[in-house]
Amino acid sequence: MSPEHGARRSQVVMVEPALTQLAKLTASETHRLDRAIVAISVNPDFGTALPGTLLRDYADEVDGVRVIYYVTALRTITIVAYVEA
């Protein structure tokens, strides 16, 4: 990676339950959630591993958002299973 390029972001995909939740959010909530998803796509390790699963739980107390997700083996795709804002 050349010095002028930042870290590669993973592609974010939302599954049906997350899409259903997203559809219920206001514009402000969606904006706050978007910032969290961008942070996760840059560094999937931000979230806390949920014991006994592949899932991670990312909660941002300042923005009041929560994202449950998992990352593919090659860390190129982040799959969002649940969102809350």
Image (cartoon, rainbow, N blue to C red):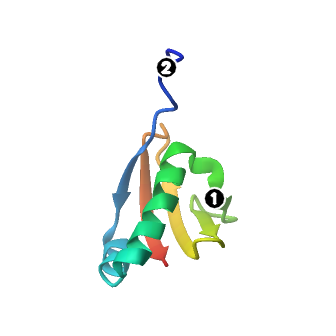
Residue holding disc 1 = 47
**In the image, what residue type sits under mark 1?**
Gly
Residue 57 drawn above or below residue 78: below
State the image coordinates of residue 39 (x, y, percent, origin top left).
53, 52
Q: Residue at x 47, y 68 (%)?
A: 32
Residue holding disc 2 = 4
Q: Kindly give the residue lying farthest to the front in the view shown.
A: 28
Q: Residue at x 55, y 73 (%)?
A: 65
Q: Is residue 57 left or right of residue 30?
A: right
Which element is circle 2 on? loop
State the image coordinates of residue 34 (x, y, percent, origin top left).
43, 62
Residue 17 drawn above or below residue 42: below
Q: Is residue 68 left or right of residue 30?
A: right
The Cα–Cα distance between marks 2 and 1, rounded to whole angstroms, is 27 Å
Question: Dot 1, how many residues are within 10 Å of its Cα: few (below 14), some (14-19), or many (20+)?
Answer: some
Q: Kindly give the residue lying farthest to the top in the view shown.
A: 2
Q: Earlier in the sequence, mark 2 or mark 1?
A: 2
Which element is circle 1 on? loop
Q: Nearer the viewer, mark 2 or mark 1?
A: 2
Q: Residue at x 62, y 68 (%)?
A: 60
**In the image, what residue type sits under mark 2?**
Glu
State the image coordinates of residue 1 (x, y, percent, origin top left).
50, 17
Mark sitting on residue 6: none
